[in-house]
Structures are given as structure tokens and as C-alpha cells.
Amino acid sequence: MKIQYTIDDSAARLPLSIRSAEGVWDREADLRNAPGVHLVELTTQHMQNTGATLTDELTGYFNNGHPSEADPYALADCFANREQLEDLLRDLRHVEAEIVALNEVEALFPVMFMHEMTVMLALTTVGYPAFGYVRTYRDSEGESYHGMVVNLAQARPHLEERLGQFSFSLLTDVIRCGFFNHQGFLLAYDVYCQATKRAPDGLVAQLKDAALRRGIAWFLSYRHNLAFYDETLGFDADRVGNYVQRWNDLVELARDATLDDESFEDWLRSVDQCEPTGMLCVDALGLFVARTLFDAHGNKGLRDAITEGPDHFITSYNAL
């Protein structure tokens, strides 16, 4: 597996650099042609049900002295915190190489799996108000490309709400591992399953597959500072027995359930119990299984589980 990536900060850099309506039109070509801006616009337009472009909204903001009533690109938040965001973007540009570690994702797939995946990593200070989101799109020839966006305007509130604190070093770790590696693994695993024609058949198989892919993704989020995240998020090894019992209950539910019109994800969230950490039981169990395999066998333990499939993931854990 080879993950080709580019980093684009245009959706952060350009809005922060513009100070007037004239400035918008001076940078109109840059806004129109920047891949990061385009990615943020596509997602914002879809999620906010609007046809407005970032150029439209910026022009209106500077002409009127305030954002539009809908403010789909959250310009009010961006410009209210302009100085802090400028400092944050500058600091991140100085450590750009440190916020990407997708080689850790590549290392979990078989050496002979030579498929490539292309992904854009975008930084923004405007757009849909989520800390991070993923969008997959296809070009005119049907080739798939993936975009992962980090909204710096949401960085401090996201970390303070989730982890109870904010620091630059913590932010770089959350971007690198908690988002890029987490989501990058999920995208790469989908590519691997499509290439190897692995398709879980039935709810029980989908549940096992979810434990593997989601568990390893969460492990990648926390692997470099497990003690910190255990304490901060309330993970407790003593709860593993509860996770196992709940997992067995979920398997029994899955044996008798049918999806009808709902998706697997909808079904899972309707029957799984959220933990105090905010994770589903299947996530927490999958995380502990991944940790156990890694502790015993390193990356090879996870790579073997990915290669052999979800049943191997579970039976290897049981054997340990």
C-alpha cells in the first residue's frame, strides 16, 4: 500500500489574508483554482444545502461589514479569531512534516499489496463547523480521490471539549494520529477490501469487520500516548470483561436481525451502547483487541489480522 498525499492550506491561508472586497477579487483566481478551497466548498455546499461559493460569501462580508444571515462558511467565527488563527496556521506550517505520518498506516498492509491511494490533506479556517471531515470524490475517468479536512477554527473548542485541554503539541498529535491516521486507515482498509474482494456477508460478518477496522483506527489515534488517553478519556482495562459480554450480546442480536431499509451503521448505533468515552462498545472492544495484538506481536499482529480478516482478529485475541 502506498498513500500519495498533498497538503493544501489555501482554505485557511487565503481567507485570513483578505481584508477587503477588492482583496477578494484580487485573489478570486486563487480562490477558484485552489484544490483545498474547492474541497471545502463542495462539503459546505452539500452539508449546509447552499449554492454559495466562498468568494460570494467573502465579498458580501466585506461589502456589508458582516456575514450573510446563513453564514454557511462560518466567516464570523473565522474573523472574530483572525489573529489566533493566523498564529496557529503559521506554527503548523513550520511543523508541516510532523503532522503527517501516513507511513504508519501503510505499514499495516501486506508488503505485496502494491495499490496506491491518493489523498489531499487540507487545512481550513472556514466552512462546515466540524473539526475534521472526509470526502471521497471521483474524476471524469472514474478514479477515486480522497480529501481529509481539518478546520482550525474548531481546533481549540474540539480539544477542550474532548480532552479538557488545549496545547499546540496536543493539537499536532490529534491532527497527525487522531485524524489523519485514523481516517487514513479507514480509507486504506476500504481500498484493500475492494481490491481483495473482501465483502462481509450478513450482519454478524459486518459486526466483526467493524470491530477490526474501527478498533485498529482508534488504536492508531492513541498508540503514541496510550496512558494519557486512557486517563483523559476514561478507558479502563477492568471494563474489558463488560465489553466482551456486550460484544457477545451484539453478535446474538445480529444473528436474528435484518437490516431492511437501514444501513449497518444505523443499525449499530441503534443497538450498541455508548461508553462514557463517547465510543460505541464495538469501538472500545476493537481498540482493546488491537492493543493486545500489537503488544504481543507489534505491527505484524495487526497486519496479519488485516490480511487474514476479522475472524483472525478475534481468534488471535482469544488465543492470547
Image (cartoon, rainbow, N blue to C red):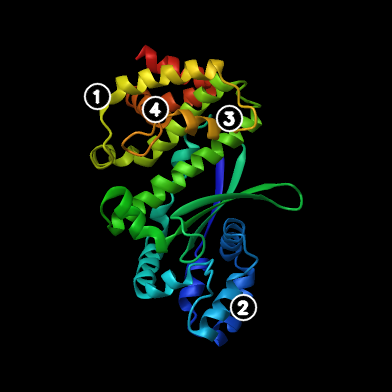
Ranked by sequence position, the earlier of labels 3 and 2 is: 2
Residue tagged 4: 290
Which residue type does callout 4 highlight?
A: Ala
- For mark 3, give the secondary structure: loop
Q: Position of residue 94 (x, y in %)?
A: 38, 64
Local secondary structure at mark 2: helix
The x, y position of residue 97, in whole percent, is 42, 56
Mark 4 vs mark 1, foreground winner is 1
Q: Which mark is residue 218?
A: none
Question: Residue 68 sits in which quadrant?
Answer: bottom right
Q: Indicate the quadrant where residue 168 lies.
A: bottom left
Category of crowding for the residue at label 2, using alpha-carbon neighbours closer than 10 angstroms: few (below 14), some (14–19), many (at least 20): some
- The span from disc 4 to disc 1 (Cα, nearest Å) is 16 Å
Residue for badge 2: 28
- Mark nearer the N terminus (2 vs 1): 2
Work out how far the residue at label 3 is from the one at label 2, CA to CA, in angstroms: 45 Å
Q: Of the residues shown, which amino acid type is indicated by label 2?
A: Glu
Q: Disc 2 or disc 1, which is closer to the eye?
A: 1
The kind of residue on which mark 1 rests is Asp
